[in-house]
Image: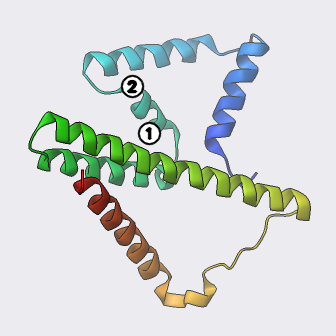
Amino acid sequence: TDELPAPQATLMKVVIEGVLERNLPWLFVGIGVGIALTCEVLRIPSLPFAVGVYLPVSTMVPVFLGGLLRFFAEKKSSDEEETSLRREKGVLLGSGLVGGEGLLGVGIAGVAVILKHAPKGIGYDWADWLAPWLSALALVFLGWTFWRLIRKA
C-alpha cells in the first residue's frame, strides 16, 4: 500500500505467483539472465546489481554508504585475516540492523492491522528545521559506531 510500501515483498509476490500460475514473462526473465551473465563476466556481483536496479534510491543509499564503509575498512586492513575478521563483524552488524528494521516494520504493520489504518507516529513536525540535521547526525553516529566496532577486529 502507499502507507506501508514493501517493494521487496511485492517483487517476491510477483515471482512466486508467476511460477505457481505458470505465467512468468519469459522474455523479461531471459533479458534478466542475459544482464546477470554480463555482470558476472564483468566481475560485477549480479545480485546486488539487480537489487540496486529494482529498489528505489531511498532504499539503496544506505546500502551504498555501507559499501563505502566496507571498502575503506578493508583498505585499512594490514592482512587477509584482519580483513576477513572485519568483514565478518561488519556483516554481522549490518545483518542485525536489517533484521531489526524488518522486525520493526512487521510491528508497525501489526499495529496498522489492529487499528485498521497506518499509525501516524511522532512525525517530524516537532523538529521543524532541525529534522534533516538530526537525521544526518543519527547517520553519522551510526557510521562512526559501525567504524569503531569493525576497527577493533
Q: Is residue 25 above or below residue 56?
A: above
Give the CA distance from mark 2 to mark 1.
Answer: 10 Å
Observer able to see residue 146: yes
N-terminal-most mark, 2 or 1: 2
Task: Please name the residue that numbered disc 1 is placed on.
Answer: 52
Q: Measuring 30% from the left and 66% from the top, which residue is drawn there?
A: 144
Which picture quadrant has residue 145?
A: bottom left
Based on the displayed image, in which of its 4 quarters is residue 38 positioned? top left
- Neighbours of disc 2 within 10 Å: few (<14), some (14-19), many (20+): some
Q: Is residue 74 left or right of residue 60?
A: left
Which residue type does callout 2 highlight?
Ser
Q: Which residue is mark 2?
A: 46
* Residue 147: percent from left, percent from top: 28, 59
**In this rendering, position of residue 106 left or right of residue 150:** right
115 lies left or right of 81? right
Residue 17 vs residue 23, the one in the foreground: 17
